[in-house]
């Protein structure tokens, strides 16, 4: 089959690789009909996530038709499914608590060693990501092997287009969980850093959850426009002093909740960010935490901090004093996708949530490398790329 | 941080007494009173000629089936990937063929010295074994209905002494790591009916 493989920083290629096959009884094989490139893929593309090997098949946002199902799978060939990017067994202590991205049983034991060293504990397996999360072949391919196919995949009823439901695999529940983690109360002011797909879905979710105003922060005019279109107020950080503006826009109180939907590769020329960029380039392993630092400074006393943005290692100059002194509440995590699947599918079906507004480009899988390059270099126009194998 | 003789002997039980005594004879008494941590978590790993290690894992299952699997040589290779074969002889000796560093085969001969149904299996190596080792596996109910805590402790003389120990670590075949992997695989097998893997069987294993 054809698949997008990793060959080094800024080097991904569509190649012919062996077809996947069933290994475990609960597996299924999916023929991919649509897959997307995610901001998380950019962290891999930019070489800032450890444990990615040459030849790894990337992609964790995908859907398709079941072509083969193992004896313990509950799927039937022909069914149309969206596959969550988190691989979860459904029965361990963590899955029982709906902490699906903390599943104990989906990350192969050999891969857990490095993860335990890096984080103290091993997280669940993920599709198309680092070997710290299992090194499972991903979905930017014609076919994918899906473990625990009786737990994750969401069977899609007829009548919904691929593009309406594809993002149930990751960014839609990620934006939703980001808003949920912000503990939004009626009338709250919520500030969101980053108007990529995750930030945009977080804005949409925060408004549904009753936020009084959502203030979105980015520097790309088109992305800020999309945020405005959802009903957010926007701040262009290249034009405006963000901290001062947030204070003034919240009656001198500060936002009740802040969401960092930027992650470890923050843009900008602030001094702290320039230093972080240098360290990241020379491999000192420091994440660029500029957006998170700003969020911690901006949030009101006793406020809530939600971090859907991905971080892989250490952050320097972390304003721990602000966190402690202001008595902040911090919630984060890789999304527990399966927790939100049915609720969000229903909201899409009822027309409450539109997922297609952020798709800017549709490409054949063969042109995936182009997609990566543009999603990285032309972020203003390239907001979300959907690939068709 | 030092552990006292009793602190160390307790988790290892009968089989551990010899090691503990050996260790106690070589170490000056510590000025710190013992803490509550298991002896195997002591900062020192060497106790005389022995390396001691262990690991606990909580499995959502009753103790009985877990004990039964551990007691049945034909079941062990289902989750012990570095074990090529285990056979029980007529006289009660278990013969283990292990994959050591650089794919070398190592034979371990053991005998169960203490056994309490669904609770404990303590074993030690016997005459003819290529490795001097002793250990035990304990099963107890986990709090809050979380299943069973399985705790495995091993004390062994690394073939080749200190050098051998570091070699094993370098090749990823030191028993602490392998033991940790095996407990996790057992957990996967019991909780999900399968063992997670990202690659087809041909590439699987060490
Ligand atoms: N928690 C999860 O499970 C999960 C899932 C998916 C994605 N993510 C993460 O969410 C983050 C965003 O993903 P995405 O797909 O939206 O990525 P993206 O790269 O498309 O968007 C990031 C946006 O942040 C903006 N930005 C950069 N620096 C900024 C700054 N200092 N202030 C304000 N805005 C800034 C960029 O201009 C861009 O628009 C990534 O870190 C991604 O890895 C997390
Ligand atoms: Zn994603
Ligand atoms: Zn699980």
Image (cartoon, grey):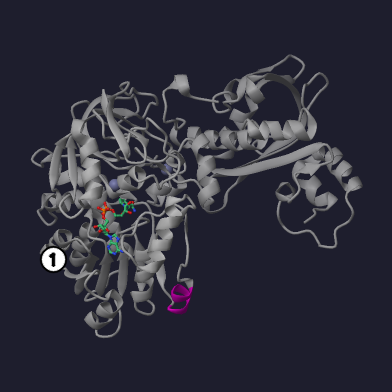
Please provide percent x and percent y for residue A113.
Answer: 54, 41
Q: Main secondary structure of the magenta part?
A: helix
Q: Quadrant of the C terminus of chain B?
A: top right
**On screen, A27 above or below B33?**
above
Residue receiving disc 1: A228
* Residue at x 79%, y 51% (from the top left corner): B7
Task: Count neighbours of disc 1 (C-alpha within 10 A) and say few if under 14, some if 14 to 19, many if 20 or more.
Answer: some
Q: Nearer the viewer, residue A175 or A348?
A: A175
Q: Quadrant of residue A220?
A: bottom left
Residue B189 is covered by the magenta coloring = no
Above or below, comparing residue A293 to residue B2 in the picture: below
Query: Is A302 left, or right, of B77 in this rendering?
Result: left
**Image side of residue B41 versus residue A370, left or right:** right
Label 1 marks which chain's residue?
Answer: A
Most extreme residue toward the right is B25
Residue B168 seen from this side: yes
**Quadrant in which residue A351 is drawn:** bottom left
Of residue B91 and residue A37, the one placed in the foreground of this image is: A37
Does the stretch in magenta take in A322? yes
What percent of the width, then of the height, locates residue A254?
30, 79
Q: Nearer the viewer, residue A335 or A268?
A: A268
* Magenta residues, start to end: A321-326
Q: Quadrant of residue A265?
A: bottom left
In the rendered view, tell whether residue B63 sits above or below residue A262.
above
Give the side of residue A36 with respect to residue A354, left or right.
right
Q: Inspect this view and state whether residue A80 appears.
A: no
Q: Quadrant of ligand 3?
A: top left
Q: Position of residue A375 (x, y in %)?
A: 22, 47
Label 1 secondary element: helix
Image location (x, y in percent) of residue B44: 76, 48
Viewport quadrant of the N terminus of chain B: bottom right
Left/right of residue A68 with respect to residue A321 in the rendered view:
left
């Amino acid at each position: 089959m054809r698949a997008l493989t990793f060959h080094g920083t800024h080097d991904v290629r569509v190649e012919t690789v062996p077809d996947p096959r069933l290994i475990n009884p609960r597996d299924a094989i999916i023929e991919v009909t649509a897959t997307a490139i995610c901001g998380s893929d950019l962290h891999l593309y930019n070489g800032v996530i450890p444990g990615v090997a040459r030849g790894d098949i990337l992609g964790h946002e995908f859907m398709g038709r079941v072509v083969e199902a193992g004896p313990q799978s509950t799927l039937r060939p022909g069914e149309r499914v969206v596959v969550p990017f988190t691989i979860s067994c459904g029965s361990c202590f963590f899955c029982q608590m709906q902490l699906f991205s903390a599943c104990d049983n989906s990350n192969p034991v050999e891969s857990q060693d490095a993860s335990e060293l890096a984080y103290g504990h091993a997280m669940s397996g993920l599709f198309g990501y680092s070997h710290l999360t299992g090194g499972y072949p991903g979905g930017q391919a014609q076919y994918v092997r899906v473990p625990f196919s009786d737990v994750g995949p969401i069977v899609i009823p007829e009548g919904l287009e691929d593009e309406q439901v594809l993002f149930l695999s990751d960014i839609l529940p990620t934006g939703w969980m980001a808003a949920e983690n912000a503990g939004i109360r009626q009338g709250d002011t919520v500030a969101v850093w980053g108007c990529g797909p995750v930030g945009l879905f977080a804005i949409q979710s925060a408004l549904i959850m009753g936020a009084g105003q959502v203030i979105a922060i980015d520097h790309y005019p088109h992305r800020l426009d999309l945020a405005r279109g959802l009903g957010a107020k926007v701040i262009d950080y290249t034009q405006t002093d963000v901290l001062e503006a947030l204070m003034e826009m919240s009656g001198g109180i500060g936002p009740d909740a802040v969401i960092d939907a930027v992650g470890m590769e923050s843009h900008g020329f602030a001094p702290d960010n320039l230093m972080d960029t240098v360290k990241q380039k020379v491999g000192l392993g420091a994440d660029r935490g500029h957006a998170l630092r700003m969020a911690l400074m901006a949030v009101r006393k006793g406020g809530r901090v939600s971090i859907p943005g991905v971080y892989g290692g250490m952050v320097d100059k972390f304003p721990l004093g602000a966190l402690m002194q202001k008595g902040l509440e911090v919630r984060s995590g890789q999304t527990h996708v399966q927790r939100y699947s049915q609720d969000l599918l229903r909201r899409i079906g009822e027309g409450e949530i539109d997922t297609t507004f952020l798709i800017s480009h549709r490409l054949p899988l063969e042109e995936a490398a182009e997609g990566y390059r543009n999603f990285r270099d032309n972020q203003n126009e390239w907001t979300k790329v959907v690939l068709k194998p | 941080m030092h552990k006292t003789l009793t602190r160390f002997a307790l988790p290892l039980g009968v089989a551990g007494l010899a090691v503990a005594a050996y260790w106690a004879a070589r170490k000056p008494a510590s000025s710190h009173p013992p803490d509550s941590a298991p002896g195997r978590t002591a900062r020192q790993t060497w106790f005389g000629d022995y390396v001691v290690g262990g690991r606990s894992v909580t499995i959502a299952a009753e103790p009985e089936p877990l004990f039964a699997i551990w007691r049945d040589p034909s079941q062990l290779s289902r989750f012990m990937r570095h074990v090529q074969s285990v056979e029980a002889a007529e006289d009660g000796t278990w013969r283990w063929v292990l994959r050591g560093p650089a794919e070398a085969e190592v034979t371990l001969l053991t005998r169960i010295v203490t056994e309490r149904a669904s609770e404990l299996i303590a074993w030690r190596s016997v005459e003819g074994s290529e490795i001097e080792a002793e250990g035990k596996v304990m099963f107890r109910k986990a709090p809050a209905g979380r299943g069973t805590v399985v705790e495995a402790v091993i004390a062994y003389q690394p073939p080749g002494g200190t050098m051998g120990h570091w070699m094993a670590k370098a090749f990823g075949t030191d028993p602490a790591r392998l033991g940790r992997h095996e407990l996790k695989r057992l957990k996967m097998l019991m909780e999900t009916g399968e063992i997670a893997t990202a690659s087809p069987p041909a590439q699987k294993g060490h």
